[in-house]
Every structure is written in structure tokens, then in C-alpha cells.
Amino acid sequence: MSPRSASVNEELRRRSKERLLQAAVELVGERGYEATTLGDIADRAGSARGLVSYYFPGKRQLLQSAVHRLMHRTLEEALEREPRTKDGRERMARAIDAILGLARDRPVLMREHMAGLLQAEGFVPCPEQRRLAELLRDTVARNGSPDVDSDYPRLRALLMGAVYAALVPGVPMPVPVLRAELFRRYRLDWELGVPPDAKASDGTCDTDLSRFFATGAAPGCRTDGQSK
């Protein structure tokens, strides 16, 4: 049997890493951070346990990369769903709804992610985070910002603050209230994006996470609820 080519080996490594990212968000979302071990993640991904350490310095870095992947692909999906639009106000509304939607739909995962940002190692830059930042910067620019370098960090801080407020144990703020505050801040009409009372037929996808971690084209969404 001839040895595998370098391109085949690279593809196998990429798929292995993406399975680890998906397993991390699934398990932490189900069990919480402390109850999830690196061994659990490797087992769920069907990978050798040594591969986790090969790709990531530790569990916290793995989780941050995994959540940032989920965030950037969720945001990408929201911005590009049909009907596609170049309207800056609509894209800002979709961005806000996408991030707040993660806090609403995946509270355990997002709470653990936010808690990790407050630990000693804090924010860990990674390729997944950079892709998320690029999408948010583009959203700010398309919304007509005269100073993206100042307005992008402000949007990021406002979204992080809203997610934190939605997830505080015992005293969470309702997502519609947080949405209303952000929409007022950016002078967006309530009907833009996906209002909280929108029906499932608005084109949102099902809850299968695999589309966010697949190699290749960006995830898409069809109005029949199936990913593509």
C-alpha cells in the first residue's frame, strides 16, 4: 500500500481537529466545563487522546476555540441566510440576534465560555476568534461606522455584556429586553433580524451542530429546516 499524500494527511488532521471542536461544545453544553474531561472529548470525537494535546495547549483553549467556531459560523449563517441582503441595519440586527440566540439556546455552554474569559489566562486569541472578529468588523462597517477601529470593540463589548447579563445565575435578564436595548443603541427597527416572536418558518436551521464543524463550504440554511 502506497503512503498517503501530504494533502490527504492534512485533510485527515483537519477533520480530526474539527471533530474535537464539535465534541467540546457538545459535551460542555451537556455536562458543564468541570464535568467534561479531555478524555471525554477525545472519546466523543473518536480520536486518540494524545491528539487533543497535539492541537490544543489545554481544555480551556480547546473550549474557547470551539465556542468561537460555533459563534463565527452561527453569525456567518445568520448574515448570509435568504433573503440575502447588503443592508447594514438588517445585517447588524441579524448579528445581534445570532449572538443573543446562542445565550438563549445554549446557556450552559455560553456561561462556561464567559466564565473562562474571566480566568487567569483570560482571552486566548485563535484563528476561530479572528474569523469571528472579521465578521463583526464587517458588520460594523456595513452599518455605516465612520470609525470601525473604535466601533468594533464597542459592539464586541456590548454583545459580551448582553450575553453575560442573560446568563447570570439567579438574576438573568430576558433576552428580548437585552435585544431592545441593543436595538435602541444602534437605532434598529424591532422588525429587523429575527424578532423573538418570529415563527420557525423564518428559515432558521435545526439544532444539529455538525454543520458548524464540517470541512469545506460555510454552512447554509434552508427554509425546510435542513442544513446544506
Image (tube, rainbow, N blue to C red):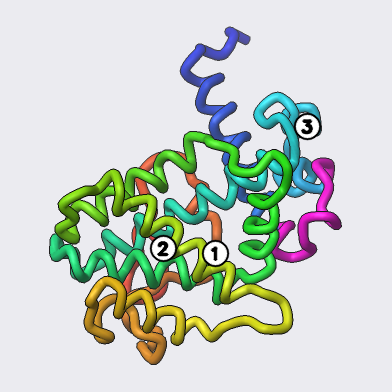
Q: Residues within 10 Å of mark 3 (few under 14, many from 20)?
A: few
In the rendered structure, does residue 71 fall within the stretch colored magenta? no
The residue wearing badge 2 is 227
Looking at the image, tell me whether mark 3 or mark 2 is earlier in sequence order.
Answer: 3
39 shown above or below 85? above
Amino acid found under the numbered disc labelled 1: Asp
Looking at the image, tell me whether mark 2 or mark 1 is earlier in sequence order.
Answer: 1
The residue under the point 65% across, 43% down is 122
Amino acid found under the numbered disc labelled 3: Ala
Cα distance, mark 3 to mark 2? 29 Å
The residue wearing badge 1 is 208
Report helix, strand or loop for mark 3.
loop
In the picture provided, is 222 more to the left or to the right than 192? right
The residue wearing badge 3 is 48
Cα distance, mark 3 to mark 1? 24 Å
The residue under the point 51% across, 21% down is 8
Q: Please identify the quadrant where the C terminus is shown.
A: bottom left
Q: Residues within 10 Å of mark 1 (few under 14, many from 20)?
A: few
The residue under the point 49% across, 81% down is 175
Q: Please identify the quadrant where the N terminus is shown.
A: top right
Query: Can you give x and y, in whole percent of width and height, for residue 52 in the image?
Result: 73, 33
11 shown above or below 184? above
Answer whether labels 2 and 1 touch (C-beta < 8 Å): yes
Question: What span is colored magenta in the figure?
Answer: 27-39
Amino acid found under the numbered disc labelled 2: Ser
Query: Can you give x and y, in whole percent of width and height, for residue 133 in the image?
Result: 39, 45
